[in-house]
């Protein structure tokens, strides 16, 4: 439950005059609005730089995909070259085996010729005498003739095979040279793409740093703006409690949405809940479009609700300064209507409940 408003008023009665003094000497709306152009400029700069980050990231990703494809081509080229070298090596081994076979067949032919020559120096009568019969003589002659024919055929076949191997070896050597050149070209392309990827990633990183620096700057400006807004009120007490049901939702900021379309623990969510708690609910315009606190008077008028500068207990008080504005609920009217005691959430951007005193003159009231 909300603590007694009368108790709160008595506790902070010394602040009432101070509220007017703050408004006269330190016009919070002007100060907060003076910061808004800077906030808008930094916000735009963040958006512009983030767009460049996204573009550079897309470019770098595209280059990386191309680099990956080129690296795959380079790996394939290296594999093909190794395969060609292996085939050349195998052909060299085949040629060595062929030369051995050629030497063997040549030796057989030499022996056959020598044997035939030796036989040629023997008279037919001697050959006949050395043979058991005429059939054996004919068989010897046919054998030597057949052997010479076979050996000669083998020699020709081996020579042809050797020539084919020579031709294939030459072709493979030419292919290997071409593959080497192709590999060099792909490697050069890989190196160029690596440079482009590194350069683009570097540019992306530089713009990311600008975005982060601007976000820190934006956070500082918003904190200054929040301080300027807070300076328009006094006596803010965070020790009080309320029955707001989403007060402990974590993390904060939260993207959980209440029944009225507002994020938990924001001033808008609390104000919508508190009005419903008082039996004076507002339409769920949080679901209808941008509905930051400073936009609430416009939404209220669209729904036929009265908006003016007259404070009323239970009315919504809207402070229109700053990037988002601030909305609160009037709990009590003091100093003949010149100040109002309000309940609120997230007044310090910390997602906390508090009560404070505000000058009526800086607020718009939604009834």
Image (cartoon, rainbow, N blue to C red):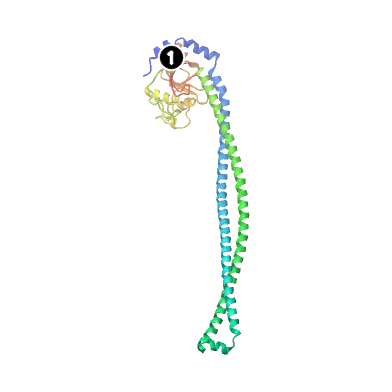
Secondary structure found at label 1: strand
**Up-down: is 295 above or below 56?**
above
Q: Is residue 168 visible?
A: yes
- Report crowding for label 1: few under 14, some 14 to 19, many 20 or more residues within 10 A (C-alpha): many
Q: Quadrant of residue 213?
A: top right
* Residue 242, position as x, y percentages in the image: 38, 20
The quadrant of the picture occupied by the N terminus is top left
* Residue 338, position as x, y percentages in the image: 47, 13
Looking at the picture, tell me which residue is in the foreground, 126 or 299.
126
* Residue 232, position as x, y percentages in the image: 51, 17
Mark 1, residue position = 333
Tag count in the figure?
1
Q: Quadrant of residue 264?
A: top left
Looking at the picture, tell me which residue is in the foreground, 243 or 204.
204
Looking at the picture, tell me which residue is in the foreground, 20 or 153.
153
**Up-down: is 109 above or below 272?**
below
* Residue 72, position as x, y percentages in the image: 55, 50
The quadrant of the picture occupied by the C terminus is top left
Q: Is residue 366 visible?
A: no
């Amino acid at each position: 439950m909300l603590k007694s408003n009368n108790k709160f008023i008595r506790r902070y009665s010394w602040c009432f005059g101070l509220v007017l003094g703050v408004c006269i000497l330190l016009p919070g709306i002007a100060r907060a609005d003076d910061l808004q152009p800077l906030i808008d400029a930094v916000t735009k700069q963040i958006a512009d730089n983030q767009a460049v980050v996204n573009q550079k990231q897309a470019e770098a990703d595209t280059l990386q995909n191309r680099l990956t494809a080129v690296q795959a081509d380079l790996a394939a080229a290296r594999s093909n070259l190794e395969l060609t070298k292996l085939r050349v090596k195998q052909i060299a081994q085949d040629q060595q085996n062929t030369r051995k076979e050629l030497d063997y067949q040549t030796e057989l032919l030499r022996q056959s010729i020598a044997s035939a020559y030796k036989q040629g120096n023997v008279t037919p009568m001697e050959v006949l005498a050395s043979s058991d019969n005429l059939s054996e003589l004919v068989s010897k002659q046919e054998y030597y003739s057949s052997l010479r024919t076979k050996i000669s055929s083998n020699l020709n076949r081996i020579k042809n095979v050797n020539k084919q191997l020579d031709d294939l070896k030459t072709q493979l050597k030419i292919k290997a040279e071409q593959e080497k050149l192709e590999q060099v070209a792909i490697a050069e392309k890989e190196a160029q793409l690596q440079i482009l990827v590194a350069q683009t990633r570097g540019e992306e990183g530089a713009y990311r740093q600008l975005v982060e620096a601007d976000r820190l700057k934006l956070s500082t400006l918003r904190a200054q703006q929040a301080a300027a807004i807070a300076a328009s009120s006094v006596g803010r007490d965070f020790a009080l409690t309320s029955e707001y049901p989403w007060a402990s939702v974590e993390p904060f900021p939260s993207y959980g949405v209440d029944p009225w379309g507002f994020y938990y623990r924001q001033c808008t969510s609390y104000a919508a809940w508190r009005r419903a708690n008082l039996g004076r609910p507002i339409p769920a315009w949080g679901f209808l479009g941008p509905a930051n606190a400073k936009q609430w008077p416009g939404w209220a008028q669209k729904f036929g609700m009265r908006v003016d500068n007259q404070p009323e207990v239970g009315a919504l008080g809207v402070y229109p300064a700053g990037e988002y504005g601030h909305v609160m609920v009037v709990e009590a009217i003091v100093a003949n209507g010149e100040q109002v005691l309000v309940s609120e959430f997230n007044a310090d951007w910390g997602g906390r409940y508090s009560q404070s005193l505000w000058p009526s003159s800086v607020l718009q009231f939604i009834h």
